[in-house]
Amino acid sequence: MAQTVSRSAVAANQSLSDPAPAMIEFTGVTKSYPGGQASLRQANLSIQRGEFVFVTGASGSGKSTLMKLIYGQEHPDQGSIKVDGQEVSQLAGDRLALFRRRLGIIFQDYKLLEQRTIAENVGFVLRAQGVRSAEIQKRLTPALQLVGLLDKASAFPHQLSGGEQQRASIARAIIGSPSLILADEPTGNLDQENALQVLRLLRQLHDFGITVMVTTHDLNLIKSTQFPVIQLQQGQLERLAEP
Ligand code: ADP
Ligand code: MG
């Protein structure tokens, strides 16, 4: 008994002195494009593991740039961006590719390969990583099932509605078991019903323990949940009071 207590006391002390890193940590981040205004100016942001957050801001405020900085497509002019404790700008080549395997990225325009079936699109990244067909097949079924597209596995993207294409892109994002999902205006091209369906799926991923960040300017979407909202305005990231 005493031993159990002292062991858990040690564990508690360790977790106090060495807390798990935030999932996303921006410190003093500045980013501008040549000739443009800064999208971020000395911006700070901390997203904990397992959170679901919305990022909102006017068109052109820098929401997509924020996402690109997180997945290492763009680099900051100044400041530090850590994802799961790792400084993203220090990654390049194979290490950047390995890092991205831990992310699931969802875009407004789905970015499906038109000449490939839904199953091929969803399994594409695993195939490129050299995962065996049998293993891909094993992972495909639950991914397509989750998004309700098992019966569309052999269809091509143009044979699907916008909502279905976005759900296919969600299946593609999760097949590698990511710890962080980044969805950049995932409902921007969808009607309200399909938007809510996509949001339901993202919430389900959050329930599985995945950290989820969603950019949107759809206030109805934001208001339909209790999740925190981060506002991007004039280069600053401000966490609004939770609804
Ligand atoms: P949002 O996603 O909020 O609409 P973006 O991150 O796409 O905003 O863009 C932020 C600002 O940076 C805009 O003024 C945009 O024109 C500019 N911008 C975005 N990407 C580039 C780029 N590759 N080169 C130059 N300017 C860019
Ligand atoms: Mg954008």
Image (cartoon, grey):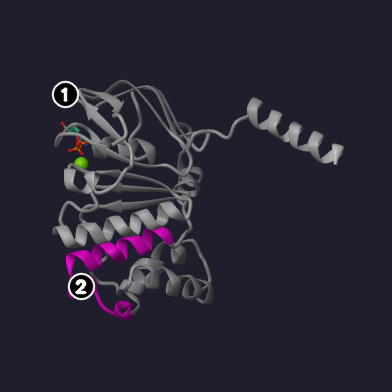
Total label count?
A: 2
Answer yes or no: is residue 218 visible. Answer: no
Q: In the displayed structure, would residue 74 be above or below residue 189?
A: above
Answer yes or no: is residue 97 visible. Answer: yes
Quadrant that contains the N terminus: top right
The answer to whether 161 appears left or right of 23 in the picture is: left
Could you say which disc has been placed on residue 35 in the image? 1
Magenta span contains residue 158? yes
Image point 42% across, 59% down: which residue?
Answer: 174
Magenta span contains residue 24? no
Q: Which residue is mark 2?
A: 160
Q: Residue flagged by tag 2: what amino acid is it? A: Leu
Residue 61 point in image, percent of width and height: 18, 31
Quadrant observed for ligand 1 in the rendered image? top left
Q: Nearer the viewer, residue 66 or 31?
A: 66
Q: In the displayed structure, would residue 52 be above or below residue 86?
A: below
Nearest to N terminus: mark 2 or mark 1: 1
Q: Residue flagged by tag 1: what amino acid is it? A: Gly
Q: Nearer the viewer, residue 223 or 171?
A: 223
Quadrant that contains the C terminus: top left
Image point 50% across, 74% down: which residue?
Answer: 138
**Which residues are drawn in magenta?**
151-174
Classify mark 1 as within 8 Å of ligand 1 or not, answering yes or no.
yes
- The secondary structure type at the circle numbered 2 is loop
Rendered image quadrant of residue 215: top left
- Distance from disc 2 to disc 1, alpha carbons, whole Å, reads 40 Å
Q: In the displayed structure, would residue 175 be above or below residue 203?
A: below
Furthest residue to the right? 2
